[in-house]
Each structure stands twice: as C-alpha cells, then as structure tokens.
Image (cartoon, helix red, strand yellow):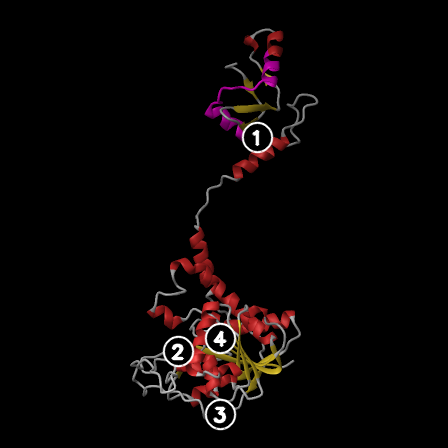
Amino acid sequence: MEELQSRGAYNFLTGTNSFKHVYRSCQNVNENEGTSSQRKENNLLMENSNIQDVASTDLAKESREENTSYSPENTEDCDAGRTPAEPTTRLNQDLYSSFIPAQKVYSDRQLLKDQEVSQSIYEPLNIEVPVIEDSMIKIPKHLKVFVHPFGDVSDFPAPKRDQCGMLEYYLMDAASVLPVIALAPGPADSILDMCAAPGGKTLTMLQTLTTGNILANDISRSRLQRLGSILEYYCPNACTHVKKSQISGQKFDSPMFDKVLVDVPCSTDRHVLTSEENNLFKPGRINDRLQITNKQKELLLAGIKSCKPGGTVVYSTCSLAPTQNDGIIQAVFEDLWNTTKIDIAVENISWMSKAFSNTFRFFDNCRFGQLVLPTLRANFGPMYLCKIKRIN
C-alpha cells in the first residue's frame, strides 16, 4: 500500500476524522508487489473501502492539482463504464471558492452608519417644478409677536397668569410663526394641523382671529393632552374652533381640507444642542434617524392628498439638513408625478426674506422654500418652510 500510486485525482470530502478517497482512475501497482491475483485483490479493497488514515500533504496537493486540471475529454485512464467524477470536482471547486478571505469586515453598526451618511446627502435633480408667484400676504392685525431688539439674545421671563387666570403669552421660537403666516388661514377655511402637538402653531392660528375650523391631530396621546392643556391656558373657548384627533398622519388621504399645515417631526437641530431628552442624535437612535426622511415624505404626501384642489399646503421643519427640507419637496414631486394624477406647484414666498429682514436671517440658496438661519445677533430658527398649491 505504501508504494501505491495513482495517475487519477483524489476527491476529498470532509468527514468527521477522515477523508473519503473517491478514485476515478486505474490504480497501478509496482511489478514487484506480488502476483496478478494480489493486484486484483488490492484494487478491489481500494475501490470498496474508506481509507481511514489522513492523506499526506504532498498527496493531497497532488490530488487537488490533478482535480483542477481534469477535463471531460481526457477519459482514457478511466475504467470501462466508470463515470468521471465531474460533479464531485465541481463541488470541490465551489467549496474552495467559498473560503476566499474577505478584504474588509463591516459590523452591523458600521453598515447602519454608512447608510445614515448616504441618506444625509441631497442631490438636486434637474426637474422642472412649476412655481407660482405668491403676492405678499398681509400679517393679521390681531397677531402680536414680541421679540427682543436685534442683537439682544436674552431670554423672556416665564409668563404669569392674568386676572382671568390665563397666561400672558406663549413662549416659542419667533420663526415658528412664519409657517402660520404663509398658510394664511381664512374664516371659511377648514384647516388640518397634521402634527399639531405641543400646540404652538395651532395657538398662533387661533390668535389671528381669522380661522375657521381646525383639526389638531397628533399620533402621540401624551403630546395631544399637552396641546389640550395649552389651549385651556390661553384660549378657554378654543373648543368651538378646534377639534382634536389621534391618528397617524399618513392615514389622511381624502381631499377634505382647504389648508393643511405639515410641521413634520425632524432632527430638531436647536433642541439637540441643549437637551439630552428625546435627542435624535443619541447613539442608540440610529434607526430613528434612518427612518426620519421617509416619515417626512409620507406625511407630506398625505398632507397633499388630504388638501382640496385649489387649496394650500405648508411644509415646515426646524432642521438645517437639506435632505429634510428641499430634498423632501423634490422627492414628493417625483412620487406624485410617477404614481398619481395629482398636479401641484410651489408658491414663491421669497417676499418673506424682505418683509422680515429686520428680525430674521434667511439662507439665500434654497430651491423650493425659505430657511431661517440662527445667528449670534438674530438667534431664531432654524426654520424651513415651503408653500405648495394643489392644482387638481
């Protein structure tokens, strides 16, 4: 057995502690080994038994090389009637290729981070978006907004109750008033505030004294309760104009409203710098960050679908990220054009940057909307808003 040689290939199939040798060629025995009967007996033993000893390294190497070089045309060494071991050869080649070492290994966290980076990139597309020139809107005379003089960034004191038990004023970022001014609610308008809580913009609409009926919606029960408390503190009779609902904003899909405000959840860039509570940039909230733009797109799509033809939708965020601002507008236009027959247009509200230049600083290069930038001398924002008109 030690002098046994093979011109054929050995196919190694991994077993528990041994290799099974499958012979596909004739075995030649040295002339000095014995008689013809002994040679036949040795061949029979080799064909019908599993060799338990592990093959030597040189023998294994030789077998692999011969296995690789085997071609179906070369069958002269095979016994008559014996099928060449082509399936086994192909199996071994598949096994070898599956063990090619990786050049770089990525963890699940790294893959999520890479996905977050890719979603944070906004690429403007060369698409023709219709733009309607919007005439300057008159600011409601009953809406009173108090701000410190330009350059004074100190805080307002906490509001106190008046003789009627109502709070004197509501504290919020002054730039948050701009989406309500752009929406221009009228007395006959039915209005949807899709993501209303905690209630600052709903309260601003009521303070204009020009609103019709408002549906204040929010998916969070606790936030909706907070909205109800705020309305009681400032407008005890608000129940005659405001109805509340607690459903997902994505479920609004019927054209029922004249005006729709879609103030979407966002990265809240100012908040995350000053508070750890509900901070979207916590390491454990990477999945929330990955889902935020898709949620914003779905909410705006629902807002447009729930707006009557001829009505107005205002989209707003408190984020500096282009992917959450102009990027969402671009994505929604593409989606509506490709999947529906709804026709919309952007209303030009560039007049705002001139009308409020003494209070806010605006970014000059937004494609679809307006963006208030916080600065040291005008510490308001960020606030992005875009006004959309549904044509049909």
The kind of secondary structure element at disc 2 is loop
- Above or below for 23 versus 32: below
Left of 31 or right of it: where is 114?
left
Q: Residues within 10 Å of mark 2 (few under 14, many from 20)?
A: many
Instruction: Measure how far apart labels 2 and 1 are at the Cα level.
Output: 71 Å
**Residue 383 among magenta residues:** no
Magenta segment, prevailing SS (helix, strand or loop): helix
| Label located before the other in sequence (2 or 1) | 1
Would you name the residue on which mark 3 appears?
A: 138
User: What amino acid type is highlighted by mark number 3?
Assistant: Lys
| Label located before the other in sequence (2 or 3) | 3
- Residue 67 shows which numbered tag? 1
The kind of secondary structure element at disc 3 is loop
User: What amino acid type is highlighted by mark number 2?
Assistant: Gly
Pick whichever, 187 or 255, lies toward us. 187
Q: Nearer the viewer, mark 1 or mark 4?
A: 4
Q: Residues within 10 Å of mark 4 (few under 14, many from 20)?
A: many
Would you name the residue on which mark 2 appears?
A: 381
Q: Are marks 2 and 4 in contact (CB under 8 Å)?
A: no
Q: Nearer the viewer, mark 2 or mark 4?
A: 4
- Residue 196 shows which numbered tag? 4
**Residue 44 among magenta residues:** yes
Q: Which residues are magenta?
A: 42-65
Instruction: Measure how far apart labels 3 and 1 are at the Cα level.
Output: 86 Å
Q: Nearer the viewer, mark 3 or mark 4?
A: 4
